[in-house]
Image (cartoon, rainbow, N blue to C red):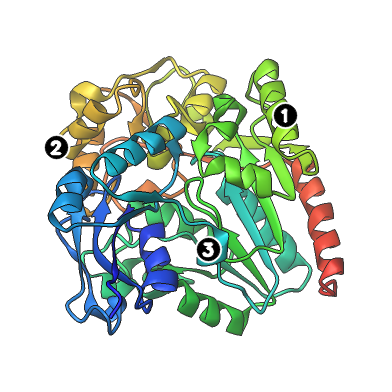
Amino acid sequence: MTQKIKVIIMGAAGRDFHNFNVYFRDNKKYEVVAFTATQIPDISGRKYPSELSGKLYPNGIAIYPEGKLTELIKEKEIDEVVFAYSDIPYSYVMNKSALVNAAGADFILQGPKRTMLKSTKPVIAVCAVRTGCGKSQVSRRIFEILKSKGLKVASIRHPMPYDKDLTTQICQRFASYGDLDEYNCTIEEREEYEPYIDMGGVIYAGIEYEKILGEAEKEADVIIWDGGNNDFPFYKPDLLITIADPHRAGHEISYYPGEMNVRAANIVIINKVNTAKKEDIETVRNNIKNVNPKAKIIDGISSIKADDKEMIEGKKVLVIEDGPTVTHGGMKYGAGTIAAKDNNAKEIIDPRSFAVGSIIEIFDKYTHLTNVLPAMGYGKKQINELEQTINNADCEVVISGTPIDLNRVLKANKPIVRIRYGVGDETAKELESIIEDFLKTNNLLL
């Protein structure tokens, strides 16, 4: 009997589980000995349960902290390590490759052929070069365009299975606020799902993306893949739109796997051109042309509006920004900061001295953050710590640059002004033209 290839999958509770499900789970050539986890709190120390791991793994698969990787490779005599998470600079990826190779194993990056599923319905995928580029606002605008054409649409979101019991998150369908509560959604999950619910839409997510696709296909004429971080799609796209961010010029060719999304794209939107420097926009444009000269390039306007701008003017404010964008996304600011400045806030405070619990740890880890508070909330405890940090803050008004209504998940002792951001009118017109061409090609224009 041929000896099985022993594998560890490095991940962050997303692509790692997907790659296992579609390639390794029933593959008798391999023995997946363990997953390792990073980026997401409280994932390591658990198991990928037997209900998901299949008949070859009746006891499930252990999930270890990534820091134990070298030890595991040697102790378990691992042959291959599969790197399966995203939004990582190339230097970091090759550092992990050196670590793995030095310990004696092969370092593997799996691509579309082994990991993409094919849908029976047309798929429009929206991906990015980094997290926080503006994927979701583009995806939602595409949803609105398709819906206005009389089509049934289902969006499928990149995974965020953060619940302690992974078996409750196999295939999730969100169409109401009650669904968010039923699945104990984190703030990060709500940021992605709430806007679709507000539009009367349906969005799927979970762990079993073959099952999720089957359910979505039952109710949709068109599937939207709403990407996460800068990962590439789990489904083979018929149209790939990649979002680039001139506020982080150069990242489109220096982060994994974001450059892949640029190279594979049919359309690249250079987003936020209304708030970026001209020279940075041109740097991004030239980089796109160099790696994908066939892609259509659109200059995208990202509109930012405050619900009540009068509450901001002349006030001492605390700015809360989308968590992933300003943590591992590396941004020092986001829409909330821009809105504070545009609406003449008197002062943007430094929240670090008011932080408690895990919020202190976030600031210790992401030292580039000074005058923004990340909207962290991976569980009730962290949401409570976020609430306490807000309530401790010496300010008059809170500016919320996260896509959700924070008042739904916490109780602040100060007024919260919500900032909304979307696709500008000119960009929306260009998107509509692209979608109409796509629908004609797929015989879906009603």
Q: From where the camera sits, is residue 381 visible?
A: no
Q: Which residue is drawn at 72% across and 22% down?
A: 282
Q: Do the residues labelled 2 and 1 touch (CB within 8 Å)?
A: no
Q: Which amino acid does label 3 sit on?
A: Phe
Which is more N-terminal, label 1 or label 2?
Answer: 1
In this rendered view, identify the residue nearer to me: 291 or 314.
291
Q: Residue 234 carries which label?
A: 3
Q: Quadrant of residue 182?
A: bottom left
Q: Is mark 3 on a helix, strand or loop?
A: loop
Disc 3/disc 1 C-alpha distance (Å)? 27 Å
The residue at 81%/71% (across/down) is 442
Q: Mark 1 points at which residue?
A: 285
The residue at the point 53 percent across, 57 percent down is: 111
Residue 287 appears left or right of 95 = right
Q: Which amino acid does label 2 sit on?
A: Gly
**Amino acid type, callout 1:** Arg
Q: How far apart are marks 3 and 2 (CA)?
A: 35 Å
Q: Residue 357: which disc?
A: 2
- Does 308 appear above or below 407? above
Secondary-structure class at tag 1:
helix
Dot 2 alpha-carbon crowd within 10 angstroms: few under 14, some 14 to 19, many 20 or more: some
Quadrant where the N terminus sits is bottom left
User: Which numbered disc, 3 or 2, marks the residue closer to the eye?
Assistant: 3
Q: Looking at the picture, does residue 80 appear above or below residue 274? A: below
Q: Residues within 10 Å of mark 3 (few under 14, many from 20)?
A: many
Which numbered disc flags the more N-terminal residue, 3 or 1?
3
Determine crowd level at label 1: few under 14, some 14-19, many 20+ residues with C-alpha closer than 10 A: many
Q: Between residue 238 and residue 347, name the one nearer to us.
A: 238
Is residue 217 visible in the rendered structure shown here? yes
69 lies left or right of 401: left
The answer to whether marks 3 and 1 mark residues whose Cβ atoms lie closer than 8 Å is: no
Image: 284 above or below 422: above
